[in-house]
Image (cartoon, rainbow, N blue to C red):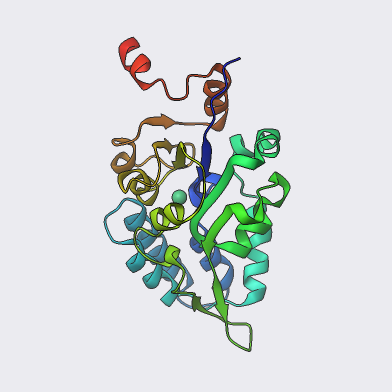
Amino acid sequence: MKRQSFSLILDFDSTFITGETLDELAVISLVGHNRRDEIIDDIRKITELGMAGKISFTDSLKRRLNQLSATNDHLKQLSKNLKGQITASIERNQDFFIANQSRIYIVSGGFKDVIRSVTNDFKIREDHIFANDVLFDEQSNLVGIDLNNPLSRDHGKSQVIKKSNIPHPILMFGDGYTDLEVKKDGAADYFFAFTENVNRPEVTCEADRVISSFDEFIEMYQKGNLFDFQLITDKS
Ligand SMILES: [Mg+2]
């Protein structure tokens, strides 16, 4: 069996989990709010604009956080809910994650504590998780995120990866425009678009590969042909 050596960086929202962290946080934290449906709908639309690359990530994150009023308890509930929303093909390949923990990373615009909690059973190393830090006031209300963290800004994923000592070749695996950007910015060597949860033409059109299930990824990995793009083109 031909094995290839590479670092695998996964996105979190709509990749490791089926949905988007902030959409779910809105659902939890707006219970009883008289404009709940309207705000949830608006947050979803902003998420989508950001992930399709139509507005900047900074703008998308700011606009969504402004509409939320969440507490630390909401975040605990969020972690619990998201544990039940792990992408099906990732859930059934937990063994792969545990066996390959030395080279698997998560880089996300989501919240570090939530991601740690959700990925706990997959043995993603704590120092392999790069994400935003949430800030609370004295009453445990979420007041924002740490803006000193590059992941709160545009091209944050690329910056964080470039500054880290993640060994190359690096394979970025995700569903969104910010994941594609990691390769465009030169921070990753390959970009695979993951479409099990959401398929965005703006993202897939520039991907090295389009993967619809993590099973497919593992099968290619086991055959040793993950990076044989030319071979695939020749066959088609
Ligand atoms: Mg995503």
Q: Residue at x 42, y 65 (%)?
A: 150
User: From what the image shows, is residue 54 above or below residue 174?
Assistant: below
Q: Is residue 138 above or below residue 132?
A: below
In front: 231, or 167?
167
Residue 195 or 157: which is nearer the viewer?
157
Judge whether residue 87 can be spotted in this image.
no
Residue 36 in picture, x, y percent from top left: 48, 72
Examine the rendering and report whether any part of residue 217 can be seen: yes
Q: Which quadrant, please, contains the C terminus?
A: top left
Residue at 40%, 57% (x, y): give it: 159
Residue at the location (65% across, 56% down)? Answer: 126
Q: Quadrant of residue 191?
A: top left
Seen in the picture, residue 72 relative to 93 is either above or below; the reply is below
Q: Position of residue 183 (x, y in %)?
A: 35, 43
| Residue at the bottom extreme of this rendering | 138
- In the picture as drawn, the residue positioned furthest to the top comes out as 235
Q: Is 38 above or below relative to 163?
A: below
Task: Please identify the quadrant where the N terminus is shown.
Answer: top right
User: In which quarter of the view is residue 154 placed?
Assistant: bottom left
Whole-percent x and y of residue 8?
Answer: 53, 39
Where in the figure is residue 203, as x and y percent of width and height?
33, 42
Q: Nearer the viewer, residue 215 or 168?
A: 168
Horizontal side of 177 relative to 4 (left or right) equals left
Q: Relative to 46, is 70 on the left or the right?
A: right
